[in-house]
Amino acid sequence: MEGNILYYIQSKAFSTNEQLSIAKFSDNRLDFGTPFNMMSPFFNNRLLKELHLSNNKINHFYSDWTTNKLELELLDLRNNDISTISANDFIFSSDNVLVDLRYNNIKSILLTNIEKLAIYNTEKRNVTVHVENNPLLCDCLVYNILRYSKGDMPITVYNLFELKLGNLTCVKPYVKERLQINQLDFKTFPCLEDDYFQIVDRHPSLCTSEIRPYDQIRIIDCSNKLKVELKINSNTINLKGNYPLILNFTGNYLREIPSLDYIKPLNITHLLLSNNNISEISLDRLPKTIQVLELHNNYLLSLSHEVSKFLDDQNYKKITLSGNPFVCDCNVRFLHEFVLNNRDYYEDLKNVKCQGYNTTLDDINAYDLCL
């Protein structure tokens, strides 16, 4: 029945054809009705070995294709309009089946519960599912696909089926940038905070707020907005979950460290302030929780004794100060002492220089600073 103009097949059209083995209905205009009808017209054909349905308008993956087709070997669904497939769609009754879902409209592949579904699947099955060439969204649901692609799931999942991703790409929400799945790392993959917490009604914000599912790190990214002043308030950020927060203000025109009063309840661990116009470090603007402080490529001329002592007392994992136009005179002696005390611990301090000096600060004698 291939290559006709079939729009519709009655639900019981093949109910008496129990011996039907090969059904070819490609190149038609079939859609099998709404997703609320969970069974396809081939529900009663339990002995089907091949079901050809490519180049139609099918927009749903029907459950009878997996539950009662004991001898199914080929399910061809190329060039249809299926938008979502889930882990349940990969639990085939047949142990030897090829499923082709290429060139559909698949935006979401739901693998959230696949580890539980496959927990008892100790023997390898010959089930292959092709999903290449689909317009996948780079949202939170991609996280488990990345885990699958990098071998981070139990062996029972890989025994259950083989998901062929090929050069599958995904597109970020609200952005046209396409990312190649095989080049993404699930450990660093972020998804929008609204998506992660399933928040619907939120005020728009200049900054993007994301969650990294792997380690539940929150990232508020205000980088490269070219702003002289940036404020984050309670209307534009969700205070749900006490996740460690990376706050990125890199690449603006900030003259001072922004006030963070509105987000003090959050666990700020990274404060990234590089490539701004900051000329002074205000200690009251530095949260006590931070572990990483980036201040390279700003306009710092010196560090006071108070600031140097404060930084010396902190057990930061990382601090950067290079690329600032420090002035080599007596006022820089506290910075000099701080650099000498910490250069082996903070790698960036070995690159701190003064204006007009080619040599690094740690190579300058303290006596020469105050001639």
Image (tube, grey):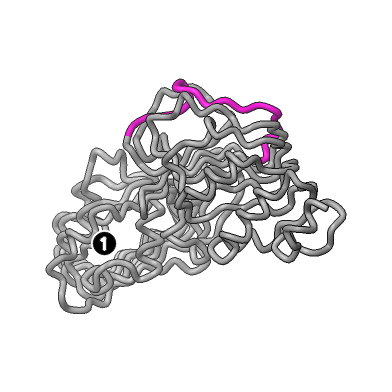
| Residue position marked by numbered label 1 in the rendering | 90
Circle 1 SS class: helix
**Picture quadrant where residue 343 is located:** bottom right
Give me the residue at 15% from left, 75% from top.
122
Where is residue 24 shown, x and y percent of the image?
35, 64
Range of residues picked out in magenta: 224-240
Q: On the rendered structure, is 88 left or right of 257?
A: left
Where is residue 356 shown, x and y percent of the image?
87, 54
Q: Amino acid at mark 1?
A: Phe
The single residue placed furthest to the right in the displayed view is 356
**Residue nearest the viewer, comparing 41 with 188:** 188
| Residue 47 to residue 272: above or below | below
**Residue nearest the viewer, comparing 72 with 273:** 273
Where is residue 38 shown, x and y percent of the image?
22, 45
Residue 241 within the magenta-colored segment of the rendering? no
Where is residue 292 shown, x and y percent of the image?
51, 49
Give me the residue at 31% from left, 45% from top.
32
| Residue 176 to residue 121: above or below | above
Give me the residue at 23% from left, 54% from top.
113
**Residue nearest the viewer, comparing 359 with 240:** 359
Give me the residue at 55% from left, 45% from top.
309
**Residue nearest the viewer, comparing 45 with 231:** 231
Q: Is residue 145 visible?
A: yes
Main SS class of the magenta portion in the image:
loop
